[in-house]
Image (spheres, coloured by chain):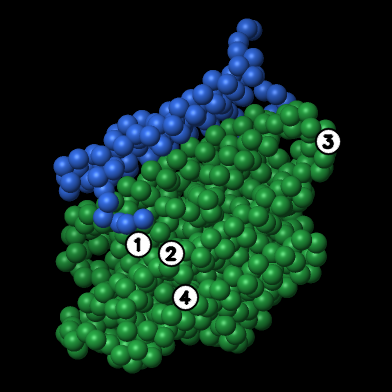
Chain colours: A blue, B green
Amino acid sequence: MSGLTIPEFLALASALLALSIFGVLTRRNFILLLIAIEIGMNAAILNFIYFAAFPLCAGHSALSGQAIAVVTIGFAATEVAVGLAIVLALNRLKGTTNVAESTELKL
Amino acid sequence: MVDFVALLSTFLPEVVIAAAALLVFLLDVLGVRRTEVTAGVSAAASLLALLFVVADLGIAPFSAVATLPSGLLDSSPASASTSLYAFTSLGLVFQMIFLSATFLVSLASASRPSAEPGAPTFFGLLLLASVGMLFVAVAADLIFLLLAIEITSVSTYLLVAYRRRDRRTIEAAMKFYIIGALSTVLSFFGASLLFGAFGTTNLYAIALAPATPSAALVLVGYAFLLAGLAFKVTVVPFHAWAVDVYDGAPDDVSAFLAGGTKKIGLFAFFLVFLGPVLLARWATSFSPFGLGPFNAHPVFQLVLGALAVLTMTFGNLLALWQKEIKRMLAYSSISQAGYMLIGIAIGTSPAIAGATLQIFAHVLMKTGAFLVVGAVAALGIGPLVDDWRGLGQERPYLGVAFALMLLGLAGIPLTVGFVSKFVLFSAAIQAEGYFVWLAVAGVLNSAASVFYYARVLKAMFFERSDRPAAPSNAGRLGANGLGYGRAAAIAIIAVVVVLLGIYPGPLLSVMQSAAQHFVLLGP
């Protein structure tokens, strides 16, 4: 079975996570922030699938990696649904999904 | 085949709260929108669940109704290492703490007007968040723990946002959501790396693992988990969201966030960092990035201790400058998280007991303080310290209650805040080494915090009000304009704060024995 080696794979997952964090820090549109957060969740989900398929040591998990991945995908969908609800409320109140225009609470 | 009835009876407190949440949503659909009814359901369910938890802990005279099968409580790490959940005494003590926060907030929120849109949703979400909190306390698996935290987080995002037409609450919800979701990503990423390193996500199995093929994965995994959980606990430098969220959220929700849900992150710290830090065999010969084998325990402890000192000092310094009471309380809440981290850094059983008591004390005092802020706002008085001038003379009961909460937060004798700090700091001194300096930092910070609490008290009791006579709204709500529910909740908290300050013995001994079990048991 040829596949990515562990360092190669970890580089991929870390790149996805870095992309996600960069997106959260630089984007000002709430929808793009949601997408950035999803990319980060997918980095973690990929890790679970990879380490379940190519274990480093004999595993004895009550939940196997693939099962964790499925549960996590379901959870990520819930979280995005809540995020979209907040965007809708924000858009209805202010007519914008730009986060930078929300400055009622001073820092 | 799983016996579902037996399974449900072991999770009776969780089932009661979840059923109450569904009932509240059902009542909303059926058109029963009176706040007294939904608040009653919520308060009654949390009291009932509290009774079951106390019974399961085996405290007379309640132990007769215990539902937990014997042998399940504080079972051995080996049996917990194949399960998703494990019942520990310390977990049940935390369930007790969480449920008292839910009860107090439900009781206080009974005073919100029924006409307010979304009032039933508020109680439903409050109960759903409590279900997540209860599950956190029995978690034995990292993924179970993270998902339980997320049940609470998702409910609290909506709880902050439930007043949909208020710009401030929506902005607070937005900030809360972005930071919360980012912290979730970090925690899950950390968990996935630990899964790679150990082949399991069970915390007990991780603690029992003799060695790990990749120390670097473990180190990076724990670093991500630390960052993810630190956001939830508002550890400096991951604290910035808390002040805006506590400020912008409705007052009852701020009380629940600062007094309730923040504490699940602390219990997660207990589970995740005490096991590997104190017991794990793999940690004694740790060799990441080819640095050569060394003992990882002191390094973990040093990091947690440094974060503790940073958190309490930073929170206190910023609290000194605040002019708004709610923001001052938010910063004080950040600094209090630092005291609790001391207990986690030390990790001996007296320190865990001290941190647990400190957490309980903080739940009472901070919930109470935010409820008083809500009550004062309902009276039509502004949010600034200057607006509160003379309040203690005009409304002596409210003033005395708030004074008790603040004195407790500052750690003045005869309040529970003094007892908890005393137990915690003496545990730090017993632990010797540089932990003594953690106690010194804690005492200095407590002394510094007296300044900003005293400033509010001085304004309330010794300065003359320059506002016109308070508008009379005694006709709108009972208990002199506060509402009976809110007045009752504040009174209960004030009495308990003093009572536990004078006579902490029974509660403290329950916490001490739970902490001893926890240290023996692992994680």
Which of pointers 1 and 3 lies earlier in the amino acid sequence? 1
CB of mark 2 within 8 Å of CB of mark 4?
Answer: no
Is B273 placed above or below B91 here?
A: above
Residue matched to label 1: B247
Secondary structure type for disc 3: loop
Task: Identify the residue shown where x is 67% and y is 23%.
Answer: A55
Label 4 in the same subunit as label 3 = yes
Q: Can residue B394 be seen in this view?
A: yes
Q: In which quarter of the image is the N terminus of chain B?
A: top right
Q: Nearer the viewer, mark 4 or mark 3?
A: 4
- Are the two marked residues, 4 and 3, in contact with CB atoms closer than 8 angstroms? no
Chain of the residue under the numbered disc 2 shown in the image: B
**Pointer 4 residue:** B452
- In this view, A27 is above or below B261: above
Q: Distance between the residues labelled 1 and 3?
A: 47 Å
| Residue tagged 2 | B330
Q: In this view, does B358 lie to the left or right of B124?
A: right
Give percent across and percent down for residue B174: 32, 47
Front-most of residues B237 and B260 = B237
The kind of secondary structure element at disc 1 is helix
CA distance for labels 2 and 4: 13 Å
Q: Which residue is drawn at 17% across and 46% down?
A: A94
Query: Alpha carbon of mark 1 to alpha carbon of mark 4: how far?
Result: 18 Å
SS assignment at label 2: helix
- Can the viewer see residue B136 in this picture? no
In the structure shown, which secondary structural element does the residue marked by tag 4 occupy?
helix
Q: Which residue is drawn at 48% across and 37% down?
A: B185
Q: Earlier in the sequence, mark 2 or mark 4?
A: 2
The answer to whether the residues at label 2 and label 1 have Cβ atoms under 8 Å apart is: yes
Task: Give the CA distance from mark 2 to mark 3.
Answer: 42 Å
Which chain hosts label 3?
B
Which label sits on residue B293? 3
